[in-house]
Image (cartoon, rainbow, N blue to C red):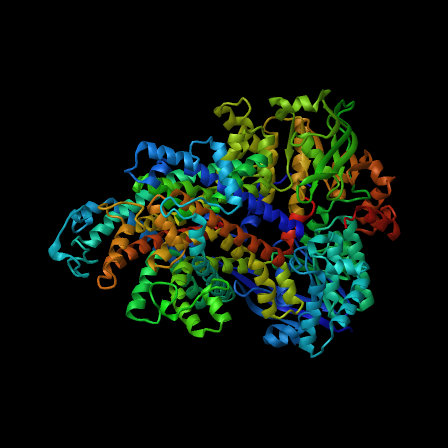
Amino acid sequence: MFTYLLKRTVTLLLVFIGLAILIFIIARIVPGDPARIALGPLASAQQVEEMRQEMGLNDPFFVQLWNYLAGLVQGDLGKSLLTSRPVIDDILGALPATFELVLFTVFLQITLSIPLGVLAAVYRDSWVDNFTRIISLIGVVTPGFVLAIILQLLASYQFSFFPVTGRVDPGLNFEPDITRLILIDSLIKGRSDVFIDAFSHIFLPSIALAAAGIGQVMRITRSAMIEVSRFDFIEASRAYGIPERVVTFGYMLRIASVAPLTILGLEFASLIGNAFVVEFVFSWPGIASYGVRTILQKDLNAVIGVVLVSGIFFVFANLFIDILLGIIDPRHRIREGSSK
Amino acid sequence: MQENILEVRDLNISFSNYGKTSKVLRNVNLNVLRGERVSLIGQSGSGKTVTMRTIIGTLPTPPAIIESGEILYERKNLLALNRIERNKIKGSGISIILQDPLLSFNPVLTILRQMEDIIKYSDVRRGLSRGHKERKELICETLAKVQLFDNERILDSYPIMLSGGMRQRVLIGMALLNQPKLLIADEPGTALDVTTQKEILDLLNMLVANEGLSLLFITHNLGVVREMADRIYVMQSGKIVETNHRENIFNTPQDPYTISLMESVPPLYGKKVIDVKNSNPIPDEMIKISNLTKSFPVRTGFLNRITSENHAVKSINLSINDGDIFGIAGESGSGKTTIAKILVGLHQPSAGQIRINKSNLEQLVELKDYRKLIQIVYQNPGSSLNRKRTIAQILSVPLKFSDYTDKMIKDRTNELLNMVDLPISYSSMYPHELSGGQKQRVAIARALSLKPKIIVLDEPTSALDVLVQGTVIDLLQRLKKELGLTYIFISHDLSLMRNFCNKIAIMFKGEICESGETKDIFSNPKHLYTKALISSIPVISDLEESLKPKVTDEERSMVLQNTRKI
Amino acid sequence: MTQPSGQELNSERDLGQQRSLTSGQMAWFRFRSNPSSIIGAFIVLSVIFLAIFAPLIAPSPQSAGSFVDFINRHSPPSKDFWFGTDNVGRDIFSRVIFGYRVSLGLVIGVLGFAVPFGVFLGLLAGYFGNWTEFVIMRFTDIMLAIPPLAMALAITAVLSPNLINAMIAITMLWWTWHTRLIYRIVKAQMNEDYVEAAKVSGASHFHIMFRELLPNCVSAISVKISLDAGFVILFGAALSFLGLGVQPPTPDLGTMVSTGSEYLPEYWWEALMPGLAILYAILGFNLLGDGLRDMMDVEV
């Protein structure tokens, strides 16, 4: 298990370093002078030149790359060209809200889609299967922003319990200072009013964000379950008298869950990307809103920072899933860890 | 009069697929007496597995439809029971051993957990409650019955960590856990090498006798049936065509299908054996292999460092003459396929030398004309023919990359189809439209397309049904005679090699332990492994059995200890 | 053992065919017995039809441009304006039809580059293995870690937002999925003996990659393209929705949703109708892709 984890960690670390370098290269080859953007169109050529010097833009490429990577290790993502504050501070301020939204979304995806997928497989070709199929299709084909708008419409006409903007009612006067996640902190502090309010805020954006994944993971779970059900050992287990309930949930689901979990990991980047739109619609005070704002204003350092932080998200999510897969299916770690 | 433990009466089953219904079992009648060993023999698709599944209650309905019939187990009709009553019999009354020992395990649970689960849920059904310790004791006792003693290690292992023979033993143990009265075995040991298979079959026979079990043994192999059955049912396309006691089936088969099955098994000893000779009176040396070694690096650990070398073949010396059918025999992992791949230039040897027609292989491989010297036919035509290309396209590849024009390619393709007895109209078909035997003919035609002198045949018949095997072997013999070819025939099927090869080399763990004229090797094997190998081959007559070399169980297990990977 | 006569050969062939219909028949049966694939094909054809003949079909072709009709602004869906009108009185239905032109143009532009490129890299990585595989697959791994929408936003923002740049941005990210798919298939195919048989026959790398391996990827690619088409439309719409895709007055579905959402909830049709139009197109491509997948029995 140790070798397996080490291997996976190093691979993902390499992915991250590669990402950092790639982003840096892209940022340097795009047209537009960062110094000019920072100073605005009215600055003189000399001012721009001084700014370039200060920002290190006149150094050789590899020196710039090295300085940038060295800064990255210390958590220095440079200064925002527009707010003049360190990018890392801006991002850390917006991060918990996004983290909470994404976490809750993944939670919804797993708890809704895997059981429904299992149901669809168990009652294959029945009305249950067709019903879940339609649900999943709706989830997959509805664009996140369209769903977000539909949900907002519904909320404003029908379900006024769900607020359509923000993260929590500021009137409740709640400071999430433990985990910085309101849902969890309110539970720790025993503030049920805050928890309910925060839940009502996060529910609609999460649904809008989760829908596509729910649909996809549901179908994948279904087909994985059906595939596993054809394995010889399932037939053998039944013949040895293992109850159907244990065969389905203990044996089949365990193996069948590998495929949906892998997909969740792979699609994690897309999830963060889609969070951009959903946060935008619901005015969620997260990193995505910040990202869209900085992108619109061509704030290059901030954009790089946002993409890199998303990359870290991706890397950790996948590491977590790798650990999970190593536990679920010992063949993963046996294969990767030992000879051949 | 002994009593029936199992009786199948007038079973009719059909399958509905894509709106089409086809009958798979027609009026199947079958019974097993208490303590009796019964065999059901048939080729793939004959309906024997469907019969088994119906008995154990795992036949998926739909697509299967049980039209009529009864299955009586201890006088209760299983097909009429409700689910709870049915489940009570599962695992305790009737138990099964499936064909593939790896696929029959849950890959993500340890052996201990799997075996414990079986006991646990059978206890639940019977209202018992045994603790973890008692369960483990029972498991260890059962493992001892199947002659496994390294319990701690085995129980903590996952299935892929065990060797094939061990898995098969554990699997038999699992089937025994709930003290069944009737054991149904679906081709056990088929996926294993003959020497291991022999051990497993002996073990099964011993268990059936000691525990007083009844056995329903399902197989396609006549030789195995002879050792495993008191009574035999022969099945062909969903029908029982003949049933009788073992002696009667083997000595006086009645049904034409049974007779053709018997004739399709190549004889190992006796008058029917064909002694093959090289057709050239004074053959020249064609291939000379000296000191050939091929090793593959073994990478381990975090950095994928090469920590050791795995010798696929070691210090091989062989001499193959013009016009030989040279057999290379051995079990899986013995290195025989590695030699084939080196000969056709797919692997580079690590050390040693190969000379073909007095030129070095290394230089020959660089030449384009090398393809015109040596070609290969693979085991499974389903894999060696690209299913997205037509027969004509498949046959044209070697020609296209030689100096043939389009017109010449077309002529040659037709000529080739002719040579392998396939109609020219097949050239526009795709492989899946052909049967297994026809596909292998196409593969042979492709190998012949550049008029090579040598053809490596890598188990060319083992993916085919026995009845088809014969026709492919006939074709190979005719082509050899007509075209003056030299064959290198790689196989694990020694009975076939006895009648097809004039020379043979026996491989064992990457080395050649014995080689020479086929006749001599079989009449007077010198190496202990050769003896163990030949004596493990299931044969279909007492005469052959008596002429096989004698190997004690001790000697056999000595050989196996040496091969078994832990 | 005798020579097999013609009759024997035929019976041998029957043996193989008895149990199954030909694969073509099975495929057609699967497609036909699956009503959703028929619906999918119908929707896709209708979208393509509307896009091609937009100027002839649209009740108010001038609405596609910067046409203004203040008298009829914010009219709800009615007999005259099926989908209602927008904030300057343009017919939303006409704009949707023209919007499909933009959407399909985007699909063709993106997939036209991303698919061949992705497939080629996948073939290279799967066929050659070793360091080729390492470089290509690690590079796609890196690309997968980038949130696609964020990346596309960044690219279009820097390059100035318009249809072409949106296309470039999406293409830059899209090929990775095809590379992964083809890589996986080729890797599996490499275990088949026909690849080795082709090598022994003296075939060139080019021949093996494009004549032997590629045909085995075609069904998976076509399913993937059908599913992709829907998602490219979605992706492009999301970009426009954030203001970084197609710019007004070009009628683009995403932009229309975005503008319309400013008038929510009173003038709900202005955002909802274009939104549903996007949904309709994506639904069609998805159903078709699913149907093709069942028909050709491939994993994508």
Nearest the eye: B344 or A65? A65
> What is the quadrant of residue C260 in the picture?
bottom left
Nearest the eye: C122 or B320? C122
Q: Is residue C29 visible?
A: no
Q: Is residue B262 left or right of residue A124?
A: right
Nearest the eye: B273 or B88? B88
Nearest the eye: C296 or A254? A254
Residue appearing at x 40%, y 64% in the figure: A202
Measured as percent of width and height from the top left, residue C127 is found at: 55, 36
Quadrant (top left, top right, bottom left, bottom right) of the N terminus of chain B: bottom right
Instruction: Decide: is C47 above or below A159.
Output: above
Q: Is residue B565 visible?
A: yes
Give the number of marks: 0
Measured as percent of width and height from the top left, residue B16 is found at: 50, 61
Measured as percent of width and height from the top left, residue C7 is found at: 57, 43
Instruction: Decide: is B177 above or below A276.
Output: below
